[in-house]
Amino acid sequence: MSLDPLIDSADPAVADVGHLLYRSLLKLDSTGYPRPDLAATFTVSPSGQVYTVSLKPDLEWSNGRPITAADVVATTKFALSPQASDATLSVALRGVTVAGDGSIITFTLATPRASFASTLTELPILPLGGLSEPALLAAATDPSAPLPTSGPYDVQSTSALAVDLQPNPHAARRPSITSYELRLYLTFREVAGAFTHGSVNAVLAATPEELTTLLRIKGAQSETMTTPDFVDMIFNERAAGLSDSIVRHAIGNAISRASVVAGALDASGGVVQTGPFSMGLPWVGRSSPEAASPAVSAEVLTHEGWVPGPGGVRQKGSVRLAFTLVAPGIDPLPVVAAEVARQLDAIGVQVTVKVVPPANFLNGTLDIGDFQLAIDRWSPGPDLDVSAFWRSNAVPPRGYDVSGGPVDPFLDSALDTLAESPSEMLRIDAAQQVASLLAADAPAVFLYTPRVSMVFRSPMPVAPMPALGDEADRYNDIAFWQLR
C-alpha cells in the first residue's frame, strides 16, 4: 500500500494512513473553516490572488530534520507532477505559483479563488525539500517505502495486509496510545467478521446498513461524523412536466427529508439538508427548517390543472406526471430513491426507480441529460463553493449544472462572489443569496448530508470522533485518545 498520500489517493486506506502520518498547512476547525496547522498564520491579499503562509517555528520531521518552506514548495510541485494521482487536488493547484523564503510561503493564483484555503487543508506536506530529481523519482517509484512524518505517528513496519504505527518522537503532541495496527480488508464482510471475533477494535461504517450490522454485535458502540458531502435529487427541466416550476416546487415541498433520514438512512446515515450547502460546513449558517406538506402540494397541483387521471397519476392535457428516477447502485442511494418515490406517489406523481452501474452514471446518464429525475451524492470538498454545480456555464465538461434551467445572471453573480471573495462575511452573505435564488429556481431538491460512523468495542478510545469532516478526519484528535 502507498504510504505517500499523494499517490494512489483514491484508496481510502491511503487517505487514512496519510492522515495519521502527515499534517497540512491548514486544517478545518469545528465549524468546517480553515485554520492554521503547520502554519502559524495565513493571510489573503485584497485581490484574493495571493495567499501568504508563515510556518510555525521549530517544526521537525520524525527524523529530527526541520520542516521548511522548501518542503512545502516541493510538495506542491510534486502534487502537480504525473507521479501524483490526486486529480482533484491537481486541478485545484493548477495555475498556482508557489515560492518559499525562510519560513514564508507565497501562493499566487491566476484568478481569485476563495476555496484555496480549503485546498491547503487537503495538501499533506511531505519531506521532499532539497531532494534531487532522482531522489524524487525514487520516492514516487516506491511509495510503499516509509518517509519521515510530521503527524502523530511514524511507520514501524508494513506488510501486504497491515501497517504498524508508532508515536512520532518529534510530533507536536505525543499520542497516548503507543501503537496502532491498521489492517487492510477487501470486503465489508471480512471486516465485520474480524470485528465480531475481536481481532480488531474499531471499524468505519460508511453506510446505514454497515452501521446496523456492526451495532448488532455485543458491546459495540458508535461515534458519528457529518461529512462535507450532500445528496440531492436533480430535475431535468427539459422533460415534459418538469419544465413547469410549479410542479418542481410541489414535488420538493411534498418530500419529507426527515422521513428519508429516519427510514432509508436508519436515522444515523444522514442529517436533513434543505439548502445547497452541506451541514458539514456550519460556518456558513444552517439550512432552513423543513416544511414538507404533501397536502399543500396536492392542492397546488390541482389548482394549476394537474388533476388525477388513470391510476391516480396527475396529468394536464397529454402530459402525465410520471417520471423515471435514476440512481447509481451505491448504498444507500437506491433505498433513498425508493423512499422518495413512495412519498411522491401520495400526491399523484408516479416515480419509477432505475438503478444504474456507478461507472455509467455520470458520463452515461447525467452528463448527456439522459434522465428525468436523478439522485446522487456529491463531494465538493471542504468548501462551500458550489459554482461547479449551479453556475449557468458549469455544464459538462466544465461542471455539473445538468438541470438545463435558464440563465440566471443574479444567481451567477452570487456564485461568483461566493467563489472569489476572500472575505468570510461576504461569502456568508453570498451563500444566503445563492440558497435563496436556488430555492426560487428549484433545479433540485436537496435531501440530506451524509454521515459516517466509527464503531468500537472495549477497550475503546474516549471521544474519538470530531463532529465534522471527511472520513479520514476521524483521526484528527488521535493524540488525545485513551483506552478505557
Image (spheres, rainbow, N blue to C red):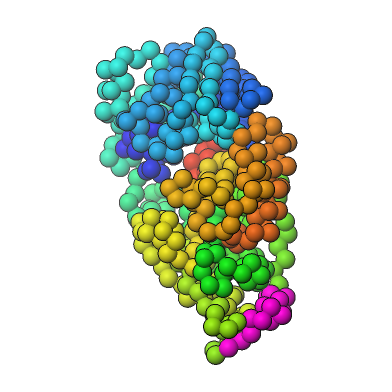
Q: Is residue 309 above or below residue 391?
A: below
Q: Is residue 392 above or below residue 160?
A: below
Q: Quadrant of residue 328?
A: bottom left
Q: How many marks?
A: 0
Residue 299 lies in the magenta stretch: yes
Quadrant where the N terminus sits is top left
User: Does any portion of residue 45 appear in the rendered image?
Assistant: yes
Residue 70 lies in the magenta stretch: no
Left or right for 278, reference 289: left
> Foreground: 292 or 3?
292
The picture places residue 90, in percent across and down from the top left corner, at 42, 33
User: Does any portion of residue 20 appear in the rendered image?
Assistant: no
> Foreground: 65 or 430?
430
Q: Is residue 92 above or below residue 38?
A: below
Name the residue rendered at 31%, 30% in the picture.
Answer: 83
Name the residue rendered at 69%, 75% in the picture.
Answer: 297
Residue bounds of the magenta highlight = 294-309
The picture places residue 426, in percent across and down from the top left corner, at 71, 37
Name the residue rendered at 56%, 41% in the picture.
Answer: 382
Q: Quadrant of residue 193?
A: bottom left
> Foreground: 345 or 225?
345
Name the residue rendered at 50%, 74% in the picture.
Answer: 323
Which secondary structure is most common in the magenta stretch?
helix
Q: Is residue 320 above or below residue 23?
A: below
Quadrant where the C terminus sits is top right
The picture places residue 171, in percent across and down from the top left corner, at 51, 22
